[in-house]
Amino acid sequence: VMASLFAALAHVENIAEGSLPQPAAEERAQPVKNPLALVQPMPTLGAPCPRFRGTTVDGLRVSTSTFKGKPFLIFLGSLRSSMTREMRRILYGYLDSKSKEDRQAFNVIEIYADRSQHLREELLRGGRFQGLAVADAKDELRRTLSVPFAPYLLGYDGKHSLVVFTGYK
């Protein structure tokens, strides 16, 4: 699990530097084999980011166009999940290890299958979010993004093509 997450973060680092080669057309067209595919399709490398909208815990509206021309990460999870807490710990540790300038290259949206109230309570308890935190209690954004389960990490390049994804298995 940790190895796949670190590999995904290395890809994202390459995206931010602009040094990640685009996958060949035949690689982009191949969906990943997934036993859950009957329930929910897996993301496909090279696929464009689906249009989405949400409101952050701070009341800011975010959408696909918020990140026009910029690479970004989408982290999906649930505050109640121990797997999400572990993935967050790894992701936050990785981002915290970067310089302030390098961190600014990472546009992060955190989408949680929790109510806005739970996200605000997390902040009141001294918790923090690395990026824009959005509540998705009805799982609408997770389904829009074709993510079969959470926690999950999606990485998009500046053209909004999916270049990396990983989940906690």
Image (spheres, rainbow, N blue to C red):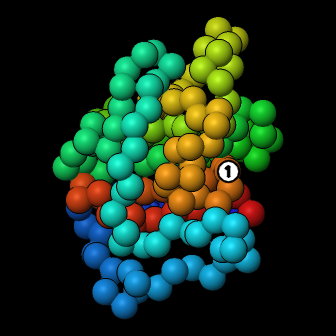
Could you tell me if residue 2 is visible in this image?
A: no
Residue identifier under label 1: 150
- The percent position of residue 75, horizontal first and vertical second, equals 54, 45
Quarter of the rendering containing residue 11: bottom left
Between residues 82 and 134, which one lies in front from this camera angle?
134
Q: Quadrant of residue 100?
A: top left
* Residue 151 visible: yes
Tell me which residue sits at (62%, 42%) in the image: 139
Instruction: Please identify the quadrant where the N terminus is shown.
Output: bottom right
Is label 1 in a helix, a strand or a loop?
Answer: loop
Residue located 70% across and 67% down the image = 39
Instruction: Report the amino acid beneath label 1.
Output: Ala
What residue appears at the point 37 percent right and 20 percent down from the top-left corner?
60
Residue 154 lies, in percent from the top left, at: 48, 56
Q: Seen from this angle, which residue lies furthest bottom?
A: 26
Most extreme residue toward the left is 69
Res 123 quadrant in image = top right
Is residue 93 placed above or below 166 in the rendered structure? above
Q: Is residue 64 above or below residue 155?
A: above
Left or right: 167 as drawn, with respect to 70:
right
User: Residue at image x 59%, y 69%?
Assistant: 41
**Furthest residue to the top?**
124
Q: Image height check: is 70 above or below 135?
A: below
